[in-house]
Amino acid sequence: MITKLRKAQDSWVAKSILVLTALSFMSLFGISGYINSAAGNRAVIKVNDRTVSQLDINQQLDQEIRTAQKLFGDIEVTDEIRGKMLAGLVQRELNAMIAEETAAKNKVSVSDALVRRIIFSQAQFLDDNGQFSKERFNYFLSQTNQSERQYIDTIRGDLKKQYLVQNPVAGFNIPSVLKKYTAAAEAQRKVFKYISLNDEDAIIDREISEEEINQYYNDFSVEFIEPETRDAEFIMLSTDDIANRVDVSEDEIDEYYKNNLNQFVTPETRHVLQMVFDNQEDAKAAKNALDKGADFYQVAREKAGQTDEETNLEYVSEDMLIGDIGAKVFAAKKNEAVGPMSSELGWHIMKATDIKAGSKKDESKVKKQIKQTIALEKVYETAYDIVNDIEDKIGAGSSLEDIAQEMGVKTYRVKGLTETGEAASLPASHASVLTSSDFTDAVFSYNKGEISQAVETDEGFVFVKVDDIVDSHPQSVETALPKIKKMWKENEKSAITQELINDVMHDLESGDNIHEAADRYHLQVVTTEPLTRSQSFAGLSQAQMLELFNDATQSPKQIDRETRHIIAVADKEAQPRTLSAEETDLIAKRLNLDLTQEAAAALINSYGKDYDVRIKYRLLGLAD
């Protein structure tokens, strides 16, 4: 069962995305937002009593697709790529669950102290002075959409997997003979000859007949159906619209101001110079020089070996300095040298050359801002009351226009909407909402004249009224004719090209060489440079290149790539490539990595044999 998931991971795009998501997981960038209590949300992966729901998987997959599109650009995530990403995600979840179950079985635990040490030592969470920064940690959590608990759980899970899987399979010693044969295969080179044909180049010397038009119209009738379309009108209640209806008391504003005073206070900042020494004696000598009037920068250069850039901390607040050093520097007078002061980094001497006083915004000046913030926080506390009130009024006979007028919002219209989200016309301001599956489902779930219940979106709530329905119906032959001609042309070109391919392949298999066959049909032969199996020509994949390398010399092979077709032969063996010591070492490392990964997979598989492991491939969309 576990091995089945690995069969769908071949294309380079999918592999790149899968490697990316695997690295993000092992680097502790966990996916958040698990919602395990959704009604009707079925478990799709089960290891003993541990389960992962279908909603969990879908949310993680959507998140990883968005991450991949950010990093790879706005790539098209085809069904094939989506399936490969899903298979990799399910495999990852399954591995994690098996590791957790094995850890529990063998009483493997990770202490809070160890997790804390790891978090406090990670470079991305350290400030310029090498100290753990809560602000940077919180920023990281917000950027990766996870809570502190989720991040800690991810670290703990990774440490268990390292102990149970990664450590046992580390340190493979690859046999010399295996290295030798792998290097020889990598160095092998062959020269290939090939003919390239493209359906687009085929010449059609006739027009489509009336009989063929009718035949295509009848045989492919499902291609010539006008889908059902609907016209609808709708209103949108945004979060801002709802927030404007939320009552916020003076006491709430006052309490928020007091509890979040740091938002409204600009702390005092000072322009600070600093020099740091390894021992107290050198620091005292530098302080004596400063007390005698020496220039701070000059002393830092001569006695601390610092550049001017390293000496100048620029403007900092008190909490940006290490430990109690901040309090001492901010208690000193302007241009007063303070120190030596001790910290984990050494002995510090500092001086503030300029002081910018802090400030505090008066509550009366930020009252409107606070009110809006509180209102937005309370939106979902009151939104459902407002929505229920609207639905009650609709049930009592109020029209959509009545509701819009009462709520102070506009009525919008969409025309010719199909179930795929396409529309003849729609308001551009709400295009993203209207093409969502939730909106489309609402439009197609009600009869003409009916008003929907509230549809929740990322922007707020939508109420839809169906104005008109045009049922699905066959297109006329005249309307379908351009599509019929296009289909016929593509098929005709493909048939002409395939007939030519069959003739060439027949001649090659009958003993002609590729030049003789090409001359007979006025085709061009291309000869490659000597290539290794890791190289390519004519856009062939690595799998296709390996097949060509494994074929006998002069054995013809046909390779189809959509409308392009390659007829190729391995013409002759070439002198093997001389590998450098670095390349040989790299091949050995790659072989080591491959074997390590296989061993890790086998180890996880062996752990899993002890448990009740179930995967619902059909619900996941990984099986018919």
Image (cartoon, helix red, strand yellow):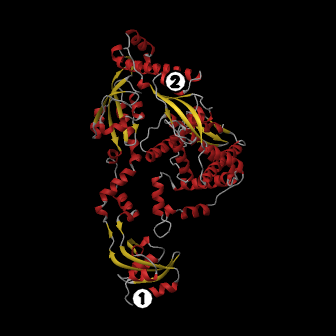
Residue 517 marker: 2
Dividing the picture into quadrants, the one containing residue 159 is bottom right
The answer to whether residue 424 is left or right of residue 127 is left
Q: Identify the amino acid type marked 1.
A: Ala
Decide: is 141 above or below 49.
Answer: below
Residue sitting nearer the eye, 382 or 132: 132
Quadrant where the N terminus is found in the figure: top right
Relative image position of residue 419 (x, y in whole percent): 40, 28
- At 36% from the left and 70% from the top, the residue drawn is 267
**Residue underneath mark 1:** 289
Residue sitting nearer the eye, 269 or 503: 503
- At 39% from the left and 90% from the top, the residue drawn is 292
The answer to whether residue 93 is left or right of residue 452 is right
Relative image position of residue 368 (x, y in whole percent): 30, 56
Quadrant where the C terminus is found in the figure: top right
Cα gap from disc 1 to disc 2, whole angstroms: 92 Å
